[in-house]
Amino acid sequence: MDSGSSGAPAAGALRDSAFLAAARGERPSHTPVWFMRQAGRSLPEYLRVREGVGMLESCMDPELVVEITMQPVRRYGVDAAIFFSDIVLPLKAVGVDLDIKPGVGPVVADPVRTLEDVAAIPDLTPEHVPFITEAVRGLVGELGSTPLIGFAGAPFTVASYLVEGGPSKEHALTKAMMFGAPDVWDALMRKIAGIAATYLEVQVAAGASAVQLFDSWAGALTPADYAASVMPHSAAVLERAGALGVPRIHFGVGTSNLLGLMGEAGADVVGVDWRMPLADAVPLVGDRAVQGNLDPTLVFAPTEVMTARAAEVLAAGRAAKGHVFNLGHGVIPSTDPDQLARLTEFVQAWRPRD
Ligand code: 1CP
């Protein structure tokens, strides 16, 4: 029941939801679970509604965004929804010439190389993204007491697409700019940080109840380079997000050696990929909650193998200030949705032995 201290029953139930409680560092009655990329190509209902509709086009259609975001919530009963969009969407909204190519990812027509290129990217204002406000409002109405996570790409990861012109393994041009043209780098990172912070503000103003900053490719950096050239810009985004009063999740891939810094950047919850045992990650994040971190390929294993490993993750999460169960990165498109349904059920029913 709603505790009634902040108005409508729905607001109380939302505030008391397992996801928001864990993200605040509390111990709800069950460990909450959601999955990065829970919407998308693993779901037949997603493939049906996306037929003939481009990725960016679908992100700018509020009705479609609501439908796609709701699909995994309906199917799995996960403890949180994540807004269906993409980290490059705000760049598209301010006029950067880019597309999301099927099977490839974001492709930028004119990669950013100079101070003039950076200056040519406008700052984001809420007027650039009315369709985001509309979609979030629609979603919050449908979700009721299920929290909606808004998100943005962190400056380093978004910079990689802008500088490389598309997906990259080594991020060589990006890091070359960071090492060799610090003035251009600084201007670019400030520009993206401003865009990301405004994008998060728009989502929270419209009703999102948590935010996740995706620095997916930060694992390409040494701790010293991260601390000197990237962390201050992510911290600027997280600081502005902190003023919104919602929990902030900070996630990257291959970031075992950065977890402490990623927490210090201003996160309430540190996302952990699957490469490091969660038990080893917990002491690194300080007085913060953790999110993660089942290997996304474990859903291809027999159910009892998957659930045994999930139980290890859940038990390790008890040592943290709060734990949100997730995969260690996004759902792999060939994942069997029925297996994710079984995983959701297992996590929500799991209780510690002690
Ligand atoms: O047509 C399609 O279905 C394209 C596949 C796709 C989807 C479903 C892309 C292209 N983006 C998305 C949606 C998306 N992107 C979400 C949806 C919410 C969810 O259900 O989780 C989110 C959170 C993102 C964020 C995103 N985009 C990240 C950070 C998260 C992560 O996975 O690390 C990154 C790095 C991107 C870039 C991107 N967009 C799309 C692809 C294939 C990629 C990665 C390309 C690469 O390998 O560099």
Image (cartoon, rainbow, N blue to C red):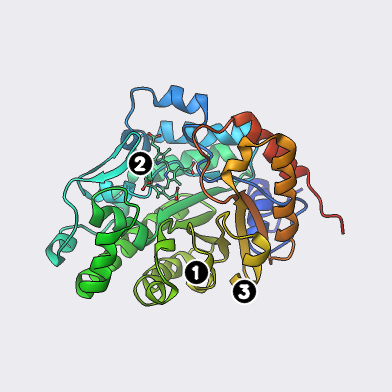
Q: Residues within 10 Å of mark 3 (few under 14, many from 20)?
A: some
Q: Position of residue 228 (x, y in %)?
A: 37, 77
Classify the position of the C terminus by image quarter.
bottom right
Reading the image, the residue beneath label 2 is 131
Disc 2 secondary structure class: helix
Q: Residue furthest left?
A: 116
Q: Find residue 258 and name its label.
A: 1
Badge 3 amino acid:
Gly
Q: Position of residue 333 (x, y in %)?
A: 49, 34
Q: Find residue 285 and name its label.
A: none
Disc 3 secondary structure class: loop
Q: Find residue 286 and name its label.
A: 3
Count up the numbered dots.
3
Q: How far is the residue under mark 3 from the one under mark 2? A: 38 Å
Which is nearer the N-term, disc 3 or disc 1?
1
Say if 237 sits above or below 97 in the image. Answer: below
Q: How far is the residue under mark 3 from the one under mark 1? A: 13 Å
Which is nearer the N-term, disc 1 or disc 2?
2
Ligand 1 is found in which quarter of the picture? top left
* Residue drawn at the location 53% of the way across and 43% of the way down: 140
